Amino acid sequence: MLACSLGRVLAKDVAAPVDAPPFDRSNVDGFALRAADTIGASEASPRHLLLNEEVLACGVAPELVVAPGTATAIATGGVIPRGADAVAMIEWTDLVETEKRPALALRRTLVPGQFVSFAGSDIARGETLLRHGVQIGSREIGMLAACGIAEVEVVRRPKIAVLSTGDELISPGEPLKPGAIYDSNGAIVAASVTEAGGEPVQMGAFPDDENVLKNALRDAIRQCDMIVLSAGTSKGAGDFSHRVVSELGTVLVHGVALKPGKPLCLAIAQGKPVVVLPGFPTSAIFTFHAFVAPLIRAWAGLPREATRAVEAAVPFRLSSELGRKEFMLVSLIQTKEGTVALPSTKGSGAVTSFSQADGFIEIDALAGSVEAGSTQKVTLIGKAVRPPDITITGSHDLALDIVISAIAKRGFTARTIAIGSQGGASAAARGECDIAPVHLIDPNEGPTKGHYNTHLRKPGLLLVKGWRRMQGVVYRKGDVRFEGKSAVEAIRAIARDASSVMINRNAGSGTRVLVDKLLAEAGIDRPAGYANQPKSHNAVAVGVVQARADWGVAIEPAANLYGLAFLPIAPEEYDFLVVESRRDRPAVQAFLDTLQDEEVRHQIRAIGMEPADILS
């Protein structure tokens, strides 16, 4: 069940099987109409429109065409009928009687697309809905449910056995006897396993008895993927955990040059990792997060945990032991002079040292001290919202999802903002993004032989070649008005047919520029449906499939995706404007490198596009 995926990590990309919304729908309760019929409407001079004899409630398929001078009552979420391109709010209207039939008096002028959500404007069929490595939360559940997806593949959480040793240990909740302490390490480690993405199996605390511990470890190795044991790894009389582990497997490391955390023991038993943490809580937590948590996160499909750091001044000299890298827990305070780091006065045996600290200073093994008044980097403890590694603003494309998924495998996060080629070019010029995908033909050249994107070059922006994709006329298979014609011939013929309806693209998009050039060359001004301007190739295809329009201009992969016929016009070039001042950022470099990756280029070809031969 979908609910079971909450908190899990996606094992592979999930593509949207449907559009959301699946049809053009109304955003308000009111009346579906033609925006052209509302021009000049005002409080003083309302426009009168005859009401059609149907009411489009949610789930009701339209049967009547909205002809000029008419309107159809529609509820929020209702399907926009053929002929309508806007919705008037019910508050803007009054019901009046005419000789023919009831009508409405409209007191506002509308623009095409007003209060209309176009098909696929939220989620487009075929687009990558969620990418592998995403941790599923309530928002992701909602996105999956909106697309009718009931099951997804997730990464299995590794089972981590958690054990503690020591005659002095008492389980929380039991009476505390003299000389005993509560087993806080078991609880801390188990919780840390969960935070790291694993599934803890708490096996309890065991006395300092080698046979008992050996049997417990055998059970843990049999049941779980990894074993984490705390205490018993030093050189005291009762510290024999490392010796028991060596009898069950092979010890790889026993002792590290860290403070706190020196007694750490790393081993392999029956092909499974075994970690023996130091017994002191702060030492155990440090070594867990340094050595164990990264392994669990990788096993669970989670990315490496990002670290945050700030600069802070140390108010007094801190001594350190030569030969061991030391992590000094500190608390941060704000003064008039800036941020100051105050070292913790508690030792590694204090349970609260780690939980009450804001961060830690890392002191090099060859440094004997940190001088008073020096500025040090403080690595912060705790989670924070991490900004994306790369921001991509402009035109969206299915092949772009392939590239983003590839850089995600390299550990980089991306934010994409689909605002069209023109919007992306403007954003890049202002330095508001790292990369802007564009496909704009030179306005001074013809629609079928013009150059793409070269006119967008300017100081501070680098044009990087991406891929070519074929644009053409899409129409329903079997429509004889298009059969046997070229795209240009079909446009010249059908655009003059008053009974045919086109579906346009939004101003600022590369496709809209192409459409306007084709219509201008054919001597056609504004054919029927010109004002219908969705913002994606998918929405164009949906409008044709659902017979709200008869034709439009889109890319060939969109036609194939929706089973439409396709008349090619000309290939367009989908390229990238890179803000040069950000070119050397690791995520941007990864993006550029990925464009030349043969596996990525193969995937791009597989969906009907051709990567550029020269990427420069």
Image (cartoon, rainbow, N blue to C red):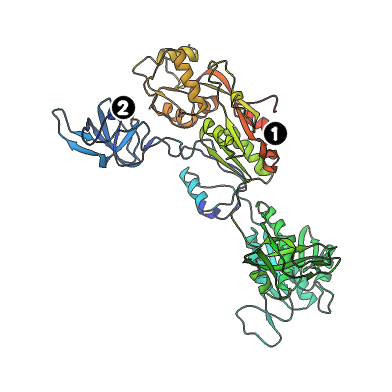
How far across and down, in percent of the image, does residue 51 sit? Answer: 22, 32
Residue 301 image position (x, y, % from top left): 66, 51
> Gap in Å between the C-alphas at discs 2 and 1?
50 Å
Q: Quadrant of residue 259?
A: bottom right
> Which quadrant is home to the C terminus?
top right
Q: Secondary structure at mark 1?
A: helix
Callout 2 amino acid: Ala
Instruction: Locate residue 71 relative to residue 174 in the image: left or right.
Output: left
Q: Is residue 558 visible?
A: yes
Residue carrying label 1: 599
Vertical side of 301 occupied by 458: above or below = above
367 vs 537: above or below: below
In this view, the residue in front, 338 or 105, is 338
The residue that disc 2 covers is 36
Q: Say which of 545 and 591 sits in front.
A: 591
Q: Position of residue 46 (x, y in %)?
A: 22, 33
Q: Using the image, tell me which numbered label, if any, was put on residue 144.
A: none
Which circle's residue, 2 or 1, is located before the other in the chain? 2
* Residue 219 shows in this picture: no
